[in-house]
Amino acid sequence: MSHGGDVCLKTHQAKQISNIKQGKQPSTLVSFLAGGIAGGVEGTATYPFEFAKTRVQLRNEGKSAVKQSGNPFRVVSDVIRNEGFTALYKGCSSLVIGSVGKDAIRFLAFDRIKGAFKDAETGQLSPLRSLLAGMTAGVVASTFAVTPSERIKTALIDDARSAGPKRFNGPIHACRVLMAEHGFKALYRGYTTTTLKQMGTTSVRMGTYNILKEYELARDIPQTTMTNFGNGAVSGIITTYATQPFDVIKTRAQSAKGATTAEAFNSVIADYGIKGLWKGTVMRLGRTVFAGGILFTAYETAVKVLDPIIPV
């Protein structure tokens, strides 16, 4: 790296340390835009992992259901062979739109809540407060963006695997059909488990990332792209194992047919036993490790670009 690059990096890092000590956060607009950009990039890049994970978690029902392997890698191979590579992106637009909204809201909420939770004297955020801030941000994101987008995405993936006529032509059509059949509440099928998952995911992922970042900045560890990616990947691993049961139950509840939380839980236990609550962990782990790295790297990069040009 050139001398000028070293100076710029040190200057930016000094500014980050100063901001943490003073309790400063990116502006509301910067947090919102950077979060949305990061969510869109992450959702698009990692969607095949999400697609395979969802297919593995769904139940094979009826004679028209296409039988499939429980191995997510085999699922990907079978889908490409039988339906083409583009089939791996079925429901992607719904997830990406949801990811843009989810992460815009999640980063905005976390940055604002984090500021409110910080110690007034030191400007620091304890590990417990960091987790609580993430949990609160998760509830906000689930309510305003995640549950509806996840419901449509899951219904589209479930509908696509049927051997019979397809019910949905796309995200908007699926939204209309489901609302016509069950009203607005159809978009919030699985809200409880989705919210629990988001509370866990956001608190663990963002809390872990924030703890690692503050630890590194306090010790003058450079916040490079690799550092951001590594922090995000570590937070993704921890998040996956901690929240996988909620993800499995949510997927069953949000299938095309739909089910209550209790019905979804009982069906998983009946099919696979307790270990079924971690169904799809391998594929989700693959996604969340990369997703965490991509998400936080994209967010930090977007903040660096937007912060100087968008007024507070």
Image (cartoon, rainbow, N blue to C red):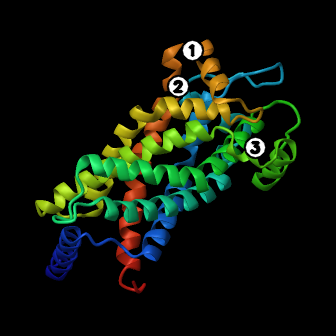
- Secondary structure beneath disc 1? helix
For the residues carrying marks 2 and 3, which lies nearer the camera in this image? Answer: 3
Instruction: Classify 10 Å Cα crowding around label 3: few (below 14), some (14-19), many (20 and above).
Output: some
Residue 237, horizontal then vertical, whole percent: 36, 39
Residue 231, horizontal then vertical, whole percent: 29, 51
Quadrant location of residue 210?
A: bottom left
Give the left or right position of residue 302, taking residue 277 as reference. Answer: left
Question: Looking at the image, do the residues carrying marks 1 and 2 touch, with CB atoms under 8 Å apart?
Answer: yes
Mark 3: amino acid: Ala
Mark 2: amino acid: Lys
How many marks are shown on the rendered structure?
A: 3
- Secondary structure beneath disc 2? loop
> Does residue 21 show up?
yes
- Secondary structure beneath disc 3? helix
Residue 272 tag number: 1
Residue 186 tag number: 3
Question: Looking at the image, do the residues carrying marks 1 and 3 touch, with CB atoms under 8 Å apart?
Answer: no
* Residue at 55% from the left image edge and 25% from the top image edge: 71
Give the left or right position of residue 117, taking residue 70 as reference. Answer: left
The residue identified by callout 2 is: 279
Give the left or right position of residue 205, taking residue 270 as reference. Answer: left
Residue 235, horizontal then vertical, whole percent: 33, 45
For the residues carrying marks 1 and 3, which lies nearer the camera in this image? Answer: 3
* Residue in the foreground of this view, choosing between 189 and 54: 189
Image quadrant in which the C terminus is located: bottom left
Q: CA distance from mark 1 to mark 2?
A: 9 Å
Mark 1: amino acid: Tyr
- Chain-order first, disc 2 or disc 3: 3
* Residue at 43% from the left image edge and 57% from the top image edge: 295
Image quadrant in which the N terminus is located: bottom left
Quadrant location of residue 123?
A: bottom left
